[in-house]
Image: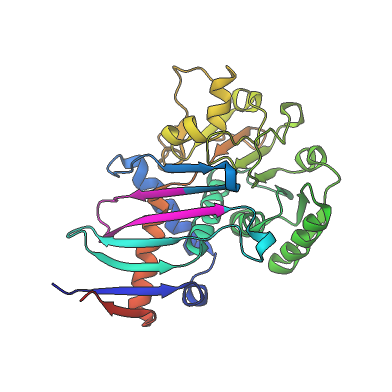
């Protein structure tokens, strides 16, 4: 029996989908759905390929009320730049929640993942950052460093951004791009320590396997969104920070205890095994304690969820039909 599948390319998606408050709203709804307890979201299938300096993740989630669910494949081959290719790519498949038949394939090269990941950081800033942020800092100089700052600026319109990375030339290029995109002062910090101490909102966006931020650098009125640790072995924060924060939140506890900063904290004894952190959806729903005043120190551990992928893929599918873009093929 023949049926139709919509094929959408990265360039088509980029013409209609961008960061903005509506994208942050979409991700907020995805996390709220997770908190409601009705989402079916299996563990991430994660494959580490050290011989080729690569990793591949597969994520999915079924959200009641959505017409479709997504299956997302995200390869990261980190030697690709030497070949003139991007490190990250991938695609999303959208399947009917009623029949299981494929409805769409998004050949997005990771663009939808970039958007939903950045928007999650925007949601975290909306709910956990101090009400007044004068300076934001980002550790890392890649695509997410730029996008996370844009998404956070939507929620907390800061006037200054500090950037730090191991390669100063890359950091300077990142700062220039940020200044151009959101019209703020952006400059390179001399050290990660300076960046943290002078910022009220910090985002870490690296694939580091050793801490980049020391617990001694934390200060009142600080929020940190750590989104680089999304696979076993990765670690951007001193594990003591998790224990010392006033509020520590995960996007999904079952993932963070295996892949995120929570894993490192538990393995080092800085988080008790019988204590469960709050999840971002619970913070959004108001069922778990959040920042009570600007002087609090808060941390959110983001590993990326299949619920986010299903939410953005459904949204892209609806846009494709309403705006009439993409190519329809028949399976016969």
- The outermost residue toward the right is 190
- Horizontal arrangement in the rendering, residue 45 relative to residue 219 (left or right): left
Q: Which residues are magenta?
A: 57-76
For the residue pair 12 and 276, the one nearer the viewer reads as 12
- The outermost residue toward the bottom is 324
- Horizontal arrangement in the rendering, residue 288 relative to residue 216 (left or right): left
Residue pictured at 60% horizontal, 41% vertical: 226
Residue pictured at 76% horizontal, 31% vertical: 217
- Looking at the picture, does residue 331 appear above or below residue 194? below
Q: Is residue 60 magenta?
A: yes
**Can I make out residue 48 in this image?**
yes
For the residue pair 163 and 198, the one nearer the viewer reads as 163
Residue pictured at 65% horizontal, 46% vertical: 206
For the residue pair 246 and 144, the one nearer the viewer reads as 144
Q: Is residue 241 magenta?
A: no
Rendered location of residue 34, percent (x, y): 36, 43
Say how the picture is coloured.
rainbow
Q: Quadrant of the N terminus?
A: bottom left
Q: Quadrant of the C terminus?
A: bottom left
Rendered location of residue 70, percent (x, y): 34, 57
- Looking at the picture, does residue 111 appear above or below residue 125? below
- Looking at the picture, does residue 176 appear above or below residue 209? below
Rendered location of residue 281, percent (x, y): 42, 42
Q: Main secondary structure of the magenta part?
A: strand
- The outermost residue toward the left is 1
- Horizontal arrangement in the rendering, residue 110 relative to residue 150 (left or right): left
Rendered location of residue 69, percent (x, y): 30, 56
Residue pictured at 78% horizontal, 43% vertical: 195
**Can I make out residue 227 in this image?**
no
């Amino acid at each position: 029996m023949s049926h139709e599948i919509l094929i959408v390319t990265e360039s088509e998606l980029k013409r209609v989908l961008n960061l903005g408050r509506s994208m942050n709203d979409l991700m907020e709804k995805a996390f709220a759905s997770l908190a409601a307890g009705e989402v079916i979201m299996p563990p991430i299938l994660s494959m580490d390929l050290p011989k080729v300096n690569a990793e591949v993740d597969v994520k999915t989630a079924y959200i009641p009320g959505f017409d479709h669910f997504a299956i997302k494949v995200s390869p990261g081959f980190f030697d690709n730049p030497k070949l003139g290719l991007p490190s990250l790519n991938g695609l999303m498949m959208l399947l009917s929640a009623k029949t299981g038949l494929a409805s769409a394939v998004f050949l997005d090269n990771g663009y939808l993942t970039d958007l939903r990941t950045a928007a999650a950081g925007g949601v975290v800033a909306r709910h956990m950052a101090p009400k007044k942020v004068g300076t934001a800092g980002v550790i890392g100089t890649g695509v997410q460093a730029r996008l996370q700052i844009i998404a956070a600026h939507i929620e907390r319109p800061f006037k200054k951004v500090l950037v730090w990375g191991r390669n100063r030339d890359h950091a300077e290029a990142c700062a220039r791009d940020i200044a151009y995109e959101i019209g703020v002062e952006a400059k390179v910090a001399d050290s990660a320590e300076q960046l943290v101490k002078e910022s009220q909102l910090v985002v870490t966006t690296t694939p580091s396997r050793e801490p980049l931020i020391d617990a001694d650098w934390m200060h009142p009125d600080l929020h940190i969104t750590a989104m680089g640790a999304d696979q076993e072995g990765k670690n951007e924060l001193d594990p003591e920070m998790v224990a010392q924060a006033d509020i520590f939140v995960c996007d999904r506890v079952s993932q963070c205890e295996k892949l995120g900063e929570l894993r490192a904290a538990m393995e080092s004894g800085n988080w008790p095994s019988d204590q469960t952190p709050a999840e971002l959806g619970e913070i959004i729903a108001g069922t778990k304690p959040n920042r009570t005043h600007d002087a609090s120190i808060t941390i959110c551990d983001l590993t990326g969820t299949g619920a986010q992928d299903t939410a953005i893929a459904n949204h892209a599918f609806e846009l494709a039909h309403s705006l009439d873009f993409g190519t329809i093929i028949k399976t016969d």
